[in-house]
Amino acid sequence: MKKQTKAIHTGFRRGDAYGAIAMPVYHTCAYEFPDTDKMADSFCGRSDDPDYSRVTNPTVIHFEDRIKALTGAADVVAVNSGMAAISNALITLTSAGQNIVTSRHLFGNTFALITNTLHRFGIEARCIDLTDIKAVEAAIDGNTSCVFLEIVTNPQLEVADIPAIASIAHSKGVAVVADTTAIPFTEFEAKELGVDIEVISSTKYISGGATSVGGLIIDYGTVEGFRQRMRFDTLMNLGAYMNPQTAYMQTLGLENLDARYRLQSANALELAQRLKGLKGIVEVNYIGLPEHPYHQAAVRQFGPTGGAMMTIDLASEQACYDFLNRLQVVKRATNLFDNKTLAIHPWSTIFGPFTPEKRRSMDIKDTTIRISVGLEDMDDIIADIDQALGN
Ligand SMILES: *Cc1c(COP(=O)(O)O)cnc(C)c1O
């Protein structure tokens, strides 16, 4: 079956007693066993009978199974946020005394996780320019646990050469972990690019129009011992497993992901082209525009669609606040890939807790607005943006 069919028709592991065609929401904490042997098998990982919903639940398993069918992964673990996916994956891979090779161009909380939280447990962050392959090679040593990258950085929209990074990392026995939130996994094959572990904020494209916060850890089976440690150490002991209501909503989101993504990407391209001509906009930054510096790298790796995230630069920081405060249709909100078009000033919000020097070192600019393009008619969005610019 093709991906879009698998997204809808991947079956339940066990038939439903009533023949339900949508996976029911199993709002239960525990499961009764017919006898002690079956109970012991479940607790010791010798069967896939669910035992306790901190580590396994039929509704969540079904969501994980659909992701597995779509990606061809060896294992998929659904957790309760994108940050839980990133932190659980990195904790599974990394021990005290090791280092993570990554970039300064990271989602704000991911940067703080690696440079603050994990740092407190004796893990070193090596922030380098991941578009410089020589720098990647120089940064990896015998204590490197993984290279961590975002496939399209947010909000700089930088795209690194993943196969080149992966070939260096793998030659030194180091895993590649990629945050692929920016482009859905239905559009490209992360494993073929050399990604070992994919982490995703399913809050974004997959949730189905911002219904719920969630995360995914997609394990391609290429890192020895990862699956065992992930399921039987990290997942059990940190307790970040997805809840069944979220899995239900995100399974529905997965069913129409392809349709939403196609329209949102087409809308984003149309908007980017039309914004270039508007008075008051200094720069439009979108990887779907052929003149974008990373357009070719993005097309080569992730296919022709550029996703729904773009940034615009205005003349000054104050112009950004004036613009945002005048918006009437576009929502002043964080999040990405909602059905609604959203706008935010990353400098004063997502990256606001960092010092100005740190923000500048991460290439966050006080003149940048990030836009997540929704499913509306772009005529209305253009009209709103135009009036908010004071035109
Ligand atoms: C939103 C986001 C995250 C964090 O995900 P949550 O679901 O909010 O925890 C991580 N990485 C990227 C690229 C994101 O856009």
Image (spheres, rainbow, N blue to C red):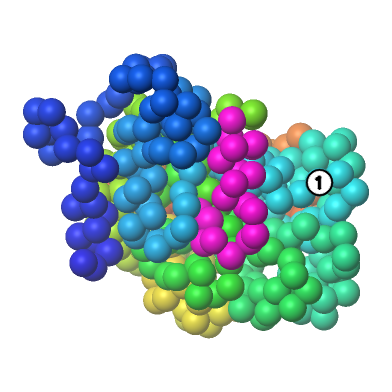
Residue carrying label 1: 95
Residue 240 in the image: x percent, y percent?
A: 56, 30
Give the magenta part as a residue range.
218-236
367 relative to 272, above or below: above
297 relative to 86, above or below: below
Q: Is residue 121 magenta?
A: no
Q: Is residue 106 left or right of residue 61?
A: right
**Residue at figure coordinates x 27%, y 64% from the top left:** 3
The image quarter containing residue 281 is bottom right
Residue 134 in the image: x percent, y percent?
A: 82, 80
Q: Is residue 201 left or right of residue 93?
A: left
Query: What is the crowding at mark 1: few (fewer than 14 residues within 10 Å), some, or many (at least 20)?
Result: some
226 or 91, which lies in front? 226
Q: Is residue 230 magenta?
A: yes
The image quarter containing residue 2 is bottom left
Judging from the image, what secondary structure is the residue with disc 1 in?
A: loop
Image quarter (top left, top right, bottom left or bottom right) of the N terminus: bottom left
Please say whether residue 368 is visible from this viewpoint.
Answer: no
**Residue at figure coordinates x 66%, y 74% from the top left:** 166
75 or 314, which lies in front? 75
Residue 380 in the image: x percent, y percent?
A: 29, 50
Residue 177 in the image: x percent, y percent?
A: 64, 59
User: Which residue in the rendered view is the most extreme toward the left?
Assistant: 19
Q: Is residue 88 left or right of residue 262?
A: right
Count of numbered tags:
1
